[in-house]
Structures are given as structure tokens and as C-alpha cells.
Image (tube, rainbow, N blue to C red):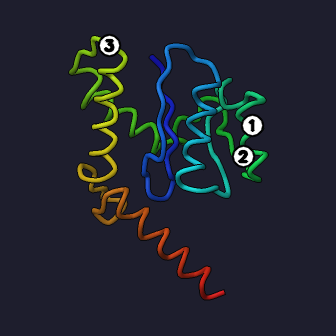
Amino acid sequence: MYLCVIMGWYSRKVLSWSVSNTLDAEFCISCLARAIALWGTPEIFNSDQGSQFTSDGFIGVLDSHGIRISMDGKGRFSDNIFIERLWRSLKYELIYIREFPTVSALKKELHAWFRLYNEEKRFHQGLAHKTPDEVYRFSQAAQDDGQRRT
């Protein structure tokens, strides 16, 4: 199975995720579209250079929303350190220690894990020991406040 995650860079909040049994662009495109529909349009979108992220469909969604594109250099895993850290935690806390007899069982466990990651489980030192949800809500409130003042 393949997993696509759209993460807010500042808050580290998982905004959207999707799984597929094929590594095509469509499940990534729908994951991106869902994140935009639920959370709004970011100024910049960063990804690696995977074929699903460089596909015409994926780039088309970004372009149609006026989102600037940032892609990491080949072999630059450290550019994506937040998402790499998420992959490591997910693998060691869920994937490697559980068995998933069906795709729906996997999706159910992923849903629960991401909820815990966003809302309860992750008190990041880099986020002043707040959860990604707390940081995201605070940053959105500050942004809304700034827009009201201008």
C-alpha cells in the first residue's frame, strides 16, 4: 500500500491523507484537493520529486489555486525532515507492530493514529510542547486577526 500525507509545515498538522494499492497520481491529487477544500489554499506547496507530485494533474491543481511549487532536490531527505519524522513514527508505532488483514482495517488504524498525532499524542518540543492541532488553531487565529486589522 502507498500512503500520501498533506502536512502543514509550520504546525506539522496532518491535513489530509490517502492510501492506494497503486502508486499513481490520482490518490495524491484527491488527497491534495481534500486538504485544500478542508483547510484552504496555502501559499507554497513543498514535495519531493516523485512522479505523482510532478504529474500534470497534481501540478494542475496547484496551478489552478495559484499555489507556488517548491520541490526538494534529488536525495535531499533532510529537506523533508518533518514528513520523514512522521513516516518514522508511523512505521515504528503502528505499521511494524500491527497486522492489517484488510485495506479497511489499515485505513481504520491510520485514521485513529493520525487523530492521536494531531490532537493528543504529539507534544513537540519544537512546537513549545503543543500538539499540531493547537499550533494550527493558534496560527489560523493569528492570521485571521491580522487580516481583520488590515
* Mark 2 burial class by Cα count in 10 Å: few <14, some 14-19, many 20+: few
Q: Residue at x 24, y 49 (%)?
A: 121
The answer to whether the residue labelled 2 contacts the one labelled 1, judged by CB atoms less than 8 Å apart, is yes
Q: Quadrant of the N terminus?
A: top left
The amino acid type, in three-letter code, at marker 3 is Thr
Q: Are marks 3 and 2 in contact (CB under 8 Å)?
A: no
Give the alpha-carbon distance from disc 1 to disc 3, as whole Å. 32 Å
Say the numbered circle drawn on residue 69: 2
Give residue 116's position: percent from left, percent from top. Answer: 27, 45
User: Mark 1 near mark 3, Cβ–Cβ under 8 Å?
Assistant: no
Residue neighbourhood size for the residue with mark 3, other residues' Cα within 10 Å, grouped as few (<14), some (14–19), many (≥20): few
Horizontally, is 47 left or right of 68 in the view? left
- Which badge, 1 or 3, is on the more N-terminal residue? 1
Give how far apart the Cα atoms at labels 2 and 1 are. 8 Å
Q: Nearer the viewer, mark 2 or mark 1?
A: 1
| Residue that lies at the very extreme toward the top in this rendered image | 101
**Is residue 45 left or right of 18 when viewed as pictured?**
right
Q: Residues within 10 Å of mark 1 (few under 14, many from 20)?
A: some
In the rendered view, tell whether residue 74 sits above or below residue 144: above
> Which residue position is annotated with label 1?
59
Residue identifier under label 3: 102
* Residue 100 location (% of width, % of height): 27, 16
Query: Looking at the rendered structure, which numbered label has been put on residue 87?
Result: none
Give the structural element (helix, strand or loop) at label 3.
loop
**Type of amino acid at the residue the image marks with label 2:** Ile
